[in-house]
Image (cartoon, coloured by chain):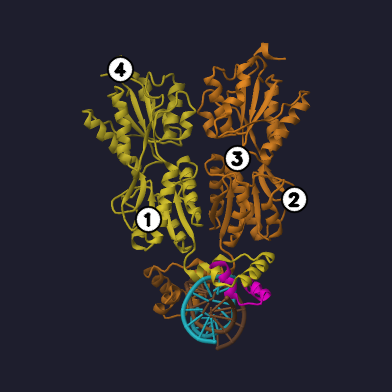
Chain colours: A orange, B yellow, C brown, D cyan
Amino acid sequence: MSDIRRVAALAGCSIATVSRCFNEPHLVREKTRERILAIAEQERFRPNLIGRQLRRKQTGLVGVMLPSLTNPIFADCAAGIEQALETQHKRMLLTTTQYEVGKESQLIEILLRQQVDGLLLTVADTAHCDALDLLARENVPYVLMYNHTEGFPSVSIDDRVAARDAIEHLLNAGHQHIAMIAGYVAASDRSRLRYQGYEDAMLAAGHKPLPLLEVDFDARTIETSLQHWLDNMANAPTAVFCSTDLLALEVIKLLRERGVHIPRDMSIIGFDGLKYGQLIEPTLTTISQPNHEIGRRAAERLLARLDGTDTHHDSLFLDHVLLERKTVGAPSLDRRR
Amino acid sequence: MSDIRRVAALAGCSIATVSRCFNEPHLVREKTRERILAIAEQERFRPNLIGRQLRRKQTGLVGVMLPSLTNPIFADCAAGIEQALETQHKRMLLTTTQYEVGKESQLIEILLRQQVDGLLLTVADTAHCDALDLLARENVPYVLMYNHTEGFPSVSIDDRVAARDAIEHLLNAGHQHIAMIAGYVAASDRSRLRYQGYEDAMLAAGHKPLPLLEVDFDARTIETSLQHWLDNMANAPTAVFCSTDLLALEVIKLLRERGVHIPRDMSIIGFDGLKYGQLIEPTLTTISQPNHEIGRRAAERLLARLDGTDTHHDSLFLDHVLLERKTVGAPSLDRRR
DNA sequence: TTGAAAGCGCTAACAG
DNA sequence: CTGTTAGCGCTTTCAA
């Protein structure tokens, strides 16, 4: 005898009435309701949501796909998502791609089979993306996070503008010889946009942009990548824009170990605004993204789509902030050129 | 016409046969199977898991409840969980309590309604815990993470022993006047156990343990809490054990700003082993917990319980490691006593 | 090797 | 205000 039936039997009513007590209590006479609820409580009746979900054809589940949880920006984002979903009693089915592009479509497929009501996701690159094609075909509400591209609903900062702001900050401090570093792992549309922002600012200032210096973040080869600078500091850039704070932190650590004083010998600016940037000495100057809010707003936007309140396919840009801290200074005079 | 029916109709077979193609393909004649699979593909048939779950009475969903995702130890743990679940094609329904004890039972209740196959969770305090009572009553497989207490299956380090090891490291460096600091937020059985470990080591060495210094981590009152030390460094402890790395990092930053040299004027040891501890100067000496592995092993253990392979109600202790880095040194001679 | 049919637990017409 | 009933999409006996 199934659960709702048991309660109904004990209460001497039909299962429909029991169901109503939980879903539309105002339709049940107060006295009946109280009796049923009392019995339900005492029997520890726990409505089986699977039954409801099958019948209603919605699950109250939101599928979330992020690159990783180990990176604090995504962990914070997930926290923001949960906060927003909670207000509507929705739950988060969380998956990560571990930066493997091949997993994106697979994971989405699984989430769709699970009949999630909607999807919140970050893909590696919106430019050529099976996952996005899949979403375009399917009629599932979704909102992108961190990615932003014409014709897809998203919540993010404007990476290109943010990167330009970072470089302008360096230019304003007097730098001209500015390089940009990015990690392979972050090989993504965001890296590309940030490099474009770098180019924008350099060109606008009349400087030739340097090619992007890509380093293998995990494999500790940053050192060899930077060796040619260390070998010839006189010709090394006076300022470096790192595509993420995690990378910036590693770069700073390495440079300091090699006797490079920051910011006197080299200025560094990061990107993300991790709180850990404040722990190091000197504290990391960086562009801050509102990760928690990106998650929260994306979730809110998804909820609005589920309501039918939001039907736009546009990018929502949140503000980034330049956190002026201590790793950027003026270039030493002898190295300006 | 529902999906599986549509495929069946197009393939000219019954829905049972279509179902078999996905679940027990060997029961279907190869030719039939190929035909059906081809049609399913072309129709983009996506089995509705809700139907399956209702019928099979299992969901392949694991409920996860953690205090927060913003703390990297839990984010890493969640990553470990996902990794283990993935091998069995299970998914993670993730919730956080935000350190609110009152939410624990509520969240578990919700997860149970969602018919999760099992639960992985960290509670604030196993000593008086509605959530644990609830689990004891219900017949749901679960494994605790970070918590460990007699009679409940868990995966964690041995906090008490780990703390003792931390203190012994300080004692071995020559310290006698050692204090312990913990944050309110972390008010938990783990803090208590770590304090006990501190007491164990102090008493064994013949020193009187100091009362636990509790600070309000978020409200930036660490400063006022430490003021009496700063006012009178001669009588301040020569070494401090911080209950978490996040706290240690803040304490170090504060002390340094106040001109206290670490480790010369004061040694600091943390707890958790966050990678961010390596970024600061001097690098943070700490006790490392295997967060990813805690998550992974707990998930594996849960899977074993679902199999019936593991039915024990005991604590599985993983090894902690003392990371000897640079924030612990010998006390300056004039302050030994 | 396949099909028919029952039913997982619940909700929502519809009827009373 | 309450009950009856028909499914939601799927799996799994049982029978053929």
In this view, the residue in front, B116 or B254, is B116
**At label 2, which amino acid type do we have?**
Gly
**At label 1, which amino acid type do we have?**
Ala
Above or below, comparing residue B177 to residue B129 in the picture: above
Visible residue check, residue B101: yes
Chain part drawn in magenta? B1-23
**At label 3, which amino acid type do we have?**
Pro
Write down the chain letter for disc 4: B
Q: CA distance from mark 3 to mark 2?
A: 23 Å
Q: Which residue is mark 1?
A: B131
Q: CA distance from mark 2 to mark 4?
A: 67 Å
The answer to whether residue B287 is left or right of residue A287 is left
Which numbered disc flags the more N-terminal residue, 1 or 4? 1
Write down the chain letter for disc 2: A
Share a chain, discs 2 and 1? no
Q: Which of the numbered marks, if any, corresponds to residue B335?
A: 4
